Amino acid sequence: MSDRSQLISAGKPFQYDKKRDAEFERLVKRYPSRESMILPALWLIQEQEGWISQEAIAYVADRIGTFASKVYEAVTFYTMYQLHPMGRNHICVCRTLSCWLRGKQEIVDYLKTEVGIIPGQISEDGKFSLEEVECLGHCGTAPVVQVNGEFYENMDVDKLKSLLATLK
């Protein structure tokens, strides 16, 4: 499990690219106050960079007109925000009871053996990162794996092998 309180510096100032800047301006008009834009603003950063750096938190705070501590609270509370660089293919494996009982550990063990990663790590080639997460809301079709935001249900090792072969 990753440390959700540790912020990493990207070593360079952050700012939205043109596409995200335009989306921010479009969205901000829909919210009752600029401060209520914290979550969407963070999502735009993660969409652009793949993770949220210390500089990005400061950028959002300045852009919205709030304290960096308020943005930090949101980033560290919600597990959907990544606080460190991720692999090109970010794999989330549900670790709750339904998935555990239906073979989640075999999936994690396979990723350790064949890909060489354990939860919280990125593969040496940067292709994969792995995270065990709380319930993904697909208990009836457990175990569930999420790759780059897309859900794969009734997962087993054979299905995972096939899935990994399709990822770039």
Image (tube, grey):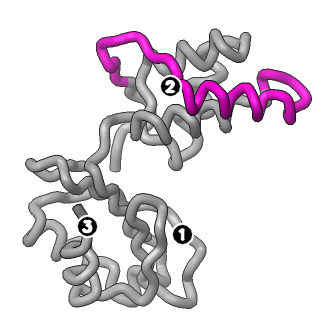
Q: SS at mark 1?
A: loop
Q: Work out which residue is located at the far right of the displayed protein and give it.
A: 32
The residue indicated by pointer 1 is: 136
Q: Amino acid at mark 2?
A: Asp
Query: Of 33 and 118, which appears nearest the observer?
Result: 33
Q: Amino acid at mark 1?
A: Leu
Distance of mark 3 from mark 1, alpha carbons? 21 Å
Screen quadrant of the C terminus? bottom left
| Residue at image coords 48%, 73% | 151
Q: Which residues are magenta?
A: 8-35
Q: Are marks 3 and 2 in contact (CB under 8 Å)?
A: no
Left of 156 or right of it: where is 80? right
Per the image, is 11 magenta? yes
The residue indicated by pointer 2 is: 17
Q: SS at mark 3?
A: loop
Query: Of 2 and 123, which appears nearest the observer?
Result: 123
- Mark 3, Cα crowd under 10 Å, few <14 / some 14-19 / many 20+, is few
For marks 1 and 2 on the same chain, the one whose residue lies earlier in the sequence: 2
Query: Of 127 and 78, which appears nearest the observer?
Result: 127
The residue indicated by pointer 3 is: 167
